[in-house]
Amino acid sequence: MMEEERFDAVITDLGLPDITGAELVRRIKGGHRDVPVIAITGLLNLDAEEINELGVFRCIYKPFRISEVVETLREALDATPVTGEGRAEEGG
């Protein structure tokens, strides 16, 4: 989907059935370095250095409140410069 459409941000769980969360983040960042990735996980023993190296904007740990996700998404979008394509809601 990332190859066909422009996304303002990605929110993903790190525990995926067919691919590791780290590999998914690598693929996203490989083609779209400017897209912030918010990772959700129930794993408390994550390697914080690896997560930072991957370029994850922030990890949200389960259980979480939806307000935490919304606030983190706002922060990620505010911290991301708008490219020439613009953000989706701006018609880009």
Image (cartoon, rainbow, N blue to C red):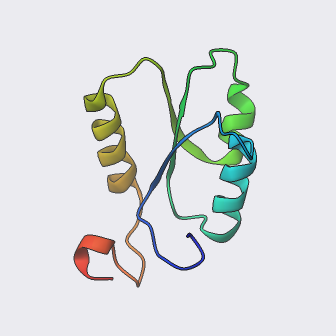
Q: Residue at x 46, y 74 (%)?
A: 6
Closest to the observer, 10 or 72: 10
Q: Is residue 45 above or below residue 57?
A: above
Q: Residue at x 35, y 45 (%)?
A: 73
Tell me residue 14's x, y (percent): 62, 36
Q: Quadrant of the C terminus?
A: bottom left
Q: Quadrant of the N terminus?
A: bottom right
Quarter of image, res 33: bottom right
Q: Is residue 86 above or below residue 30?
A: below
- Number of marks present in the image shown: 0
Q: Is residue 79 above or below residue 83?
A: above
Tell me residue 90's x, y (percent): 24, 77
**Is 64 placed left or right of 35 in the picture?**
left
Q: Is residue 84 above or below residue 67?
A: below
Q: Residue at x 38, y 21 (%)?
A: 64
Tell me residue 38's x, y (percent): 49, 43
**Is 72 placed left or right of 67 in the picture?**
right
Tell me residue 25's x, y (percent): 66, 51
